Image (cartoon, rainbow, N blue to C red):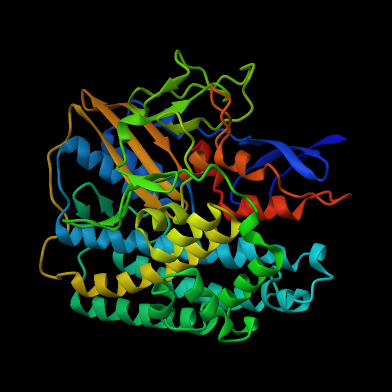
């Protein structure tokens, strides 16, 4: 016997999201993911001065506005042929890292973990401890995480003037030079943030967490203290008790544009993983499929440089305002797990080889990244050179096009701009949630979340299946970015 259910909107998720599932024999048999809100930033940018994009695109989102600014700045820089100064690049990396780490912390403490304090787990032996630690609003974890997050965001006041919607990020770098005394202030803020991470989130040094290099090392580390000793150990205990490594597996195809670049390389390398093998990213193979979107287009599939955003709510097969991004016509999962896979972090490589992309591995990758990026930020602060330039100047652009491919907290974010006669002729955006929450394509291929939901167990009489909640939130959706 089968039954179709419509779930949503998902509270705690930024923006609208609707998930439709068919349930047969106690499990999800099919799934459709819908973005029911349209916003139209790509249309707003048509005909504007190219530099107006730096004012408009941060407003796409209130929680990853810096990422939108960095992607737009890099697209403009590519179109203008300008290279950011080394100081400007370091400052942009720091600004983006603060936002990404803050997003990871917000996701873990406020969005993902409170689901384990729901009544569905009332009979579990760890339930009372989960309520005390993670229950929404009253849980101890959020009470400690929120002040630590607020302290970390003070770095953006120093580096970018304000957050969100800063205008400090420019194609040539950053407009905000840093004085030596401000370096000391930023180092002190990172010291305080490290203290929170090492006493509450991890219960161990950042170096120890960042150097976990195998499943055996992770299990040995977790067993050294009671699971209540830290948020991370508690999560690993839940992974074992609930078999979260068996929940929410998608196609195991991963993509990353590469994160935190400097003159020579990236902290996390770009690339693509298929069948466990890593290959270079061919951005010319990226396209957006319109076949199941409420969008009109002359062709079913288009590269972003030729992309069209024209709403058509009466499309016969459409069921989402989200287009379907594909790489060489294949759906790709993006996010921290993809970044750590491409960086060939040994623990994540082994976890992916063992169980692929799933609820457990997505969250572990996110927490591992918090430790690795915080350690890098401590070095980047002292690498800034107060007397050197922060921004390279360049003349206004009349003709050209360029792409800005960066990594937001949720994964690969791309902006593509075409300028003609000094005005924006076309602007296309593919956000991380557009990749992960895409609808079907013309070949019937499911988006990553749609694939990940199939097979999820659903208990008899369960109105809002908790497994579906875990899977959806393991991707950390941001729906307003999806439909920009």
Q: Residue at x 61, y 21 (%)?
A: 313
The one of 373 and 85 positioned closer to us in this rendering = 373
Is 237 rendered above or below residue 92?
Answer: below
> What number of labels is visible?
0
Q: Is residue 11 visible?
A: no
Q: Is residue 464 left or right of residue 289?
A: right
Residue at the outermost top position = 298
330 up-or-down from 364: above or below:
above
Q: Quadrant of residue 375?
A: bottom left
Residue 172 in view here = yes
Query: Which residue is found at the position 65% from the left and 79% from the top?
Result: 140
Q: At x 52% / y 83%, what residue is drawn?
A: 203
Residue 370: x %, y % from top left: 43, 68
- Residue 312, position in %: x, y? 57, 19
Does 371 sit left or right of 469 as displayed?
Answer: left
Q: Position of residue 464 (x, y in %)?
A: 79, 50
Quadrant housing residue 368: bottom left
**Could you say which quadrant of the image residue 418 lies in?**
top left
Q: Between residues 187 and 338, which one lies in front from this camera angle?
A: 338
């Amino acid at each position: 016997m089968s039954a179709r259910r419509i779930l949503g909107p998902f509270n705690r998720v930024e923006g609208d999201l609707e998930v439709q599932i068919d349930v047969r024999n106690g499990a999800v048999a099919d799934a459709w993911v819908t973005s029911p809100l349209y916003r139209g930033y790509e249309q707003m940018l048509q005909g504007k001065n190219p530099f107006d994009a730096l004012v408009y695109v941060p407003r796409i989102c209130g929680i990853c506005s810096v990422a939108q600014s960095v992607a737009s700045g890099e697209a403009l820089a590519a179109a203008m042929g300008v290279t950011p100064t080394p100081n400007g690049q370091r400052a942009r990396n720091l600004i983006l890292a603060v936002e990404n780490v803050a997003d990871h912390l917000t996701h873990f403490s406020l969005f993902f973990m409170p689901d384990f304090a729901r009544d569905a787990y009332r009979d579990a032996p760890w339930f009372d401890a989960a309520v005390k630690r993670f229950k929404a609003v009253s849980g101890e974890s959020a009470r400690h995480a929120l002040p630590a997050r607020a302290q970390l965001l003070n770095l953006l006041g120093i580096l970018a003037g304000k957050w969100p919607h800063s205008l400090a990020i420019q194609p040539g770098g950053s407009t905000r030079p840093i004085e030596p005394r401000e370096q000391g202030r930023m180092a002190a803020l990172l010291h305080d943030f490290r203290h929170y991470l090492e006493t509450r989130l991890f219960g161990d040094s950042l170096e120890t967490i960042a150097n976990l290099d195998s499943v055996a090392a992770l299990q040995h580390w977790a067993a050294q203290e009671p699971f209540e000793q830290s948020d991370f150990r508690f999560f690993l205990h839940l992974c074992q008790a609930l078999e979260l490594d068996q929940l929410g597996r998608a196609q195991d195809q991963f993509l990353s544009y590469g994160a935190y670049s400097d003159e020579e390389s990236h902290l996390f390398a770009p690339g693509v993983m298929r069948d466990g093998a890593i290959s270079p990213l061919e951005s010319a193979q990226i396209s957006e499929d319109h076949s199941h979107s409420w969008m009109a287009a002359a062709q079913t599939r288009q590269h972003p440089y030729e992309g069209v955003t024209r709403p058509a709510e009466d499309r016969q097969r459409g069921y989402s305002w989200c287009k379907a991004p594909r790489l060489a016509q294949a759906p790709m999962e993006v996010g921290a797990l993809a970044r750590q896979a491409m960086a060939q972090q040994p623990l994540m490589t082994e976890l992916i080889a063992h169980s692929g992309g799933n609820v457990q591995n997505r969250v572990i990758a996110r927490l591992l990244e918090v430790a690795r990026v915080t350690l890098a930020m401590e070095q980047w602060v002292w690498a800034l050179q107060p007397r050197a330039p922060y921004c390279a100047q360049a003349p206004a652009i009349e003709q050209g096009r360029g792409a800005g491919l960066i990594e937001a907290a949720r994964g690969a974010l791309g902006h593509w701009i075409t300028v003609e006669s000094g005005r924006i002729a076309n602007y296309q955006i593919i956000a991380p949630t557009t990749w992960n929450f895409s609808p079907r394509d013309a070949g019937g291929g499911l988006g990553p979340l749609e694939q990940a939901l199939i097979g999820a167990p659903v208990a008899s009489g369960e109105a809002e299946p908790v497994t579906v909640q875990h899977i959806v939130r393991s991707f950390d959706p941001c729906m307003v970015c999806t439909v920009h």
